[in-house]
Image: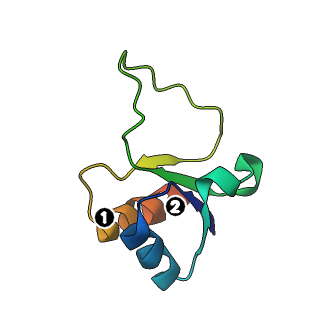
Amino acid sequence: MRVAIEEGLEDVRQAIEDAGWEAIDLEDAALDEVDAVICTGMDDDLLGDETTTTEVPVISADGLSADEVVRRLSESQLA
């Protein structure tokens, strides 16, 4: 699995790599070439608009431990 990760989530990046997945920087990623996106949640739309421009799962790491993010990623791959 190839996962794009927003800057500032080094602990999540390490946990994803420890799980055996490839972690790449979100700003360098072509969204049509990744299996999931992990963001900090800092850029959430203030009006509550959750429209995304990608078909892959987008997981907000806000309030989650690195292990919880990995768990959600695993669950998204099973769905």
What's the amino acid at mark 1?
A: Glu
Residue at 58% over, 55% down: 36
Q: Is residue 56 left or right of residue 73?
A: right
What's the amino acid at mark 2?
A: Leu
The answer to whether mark 2 and mark 1 are in CB contact below 8 A is no
Residue at 49% over, 55% down: 76
Disc assigned to residue 16: none
Determine the residue located farthest toward the left in the rendered image.
Answer: 63
Secondary structure under tag 1 reads helix
**Foreground pick, 3 / 40:** 40
Determine the residue located farthest toward the top in the rendered image.
Answer: 47
Q: Position of residue 75 (x, y in %)?
A: 44, 60
Residue at 55% over, 52% down: 37
Q: Residues within 10 Å of mark 2 (few under 14, many from 20)?
A: few
**Foreground pick, 42 / 34:** 42
Circle 1 sits on which residue? 68
Circle 2 sits on which residue? 78
Viewport quadrant of the N terminus = bottom right
Q: Position of residue 24 (x, y in %)?
A: 62, 66
Q: Is residue 21 left or right of residue 45?
A: right
Which of the 4 image quarters holds residue 35?
Answer: bottom right
Residue 59 drawn above or below residue 43: below
2 or 1: tag closer to the N-terminus: 1
Q: Position of residue 34 (x, y in %)?
A: 68, 57
**Foreground pick, 15 / 7:** 7
Residue 61 drawn above or below residue 68: above
Residue at 70% over, 55% down: 29
Spatial distance from mark 2 to mark 1, Cα to Cα? 15 Å
Q: Is residue 34 left or right of residue 78?
A: right
Q: Residues within 10 Å of mark 1 (few under 14, many from 20)?
A: some
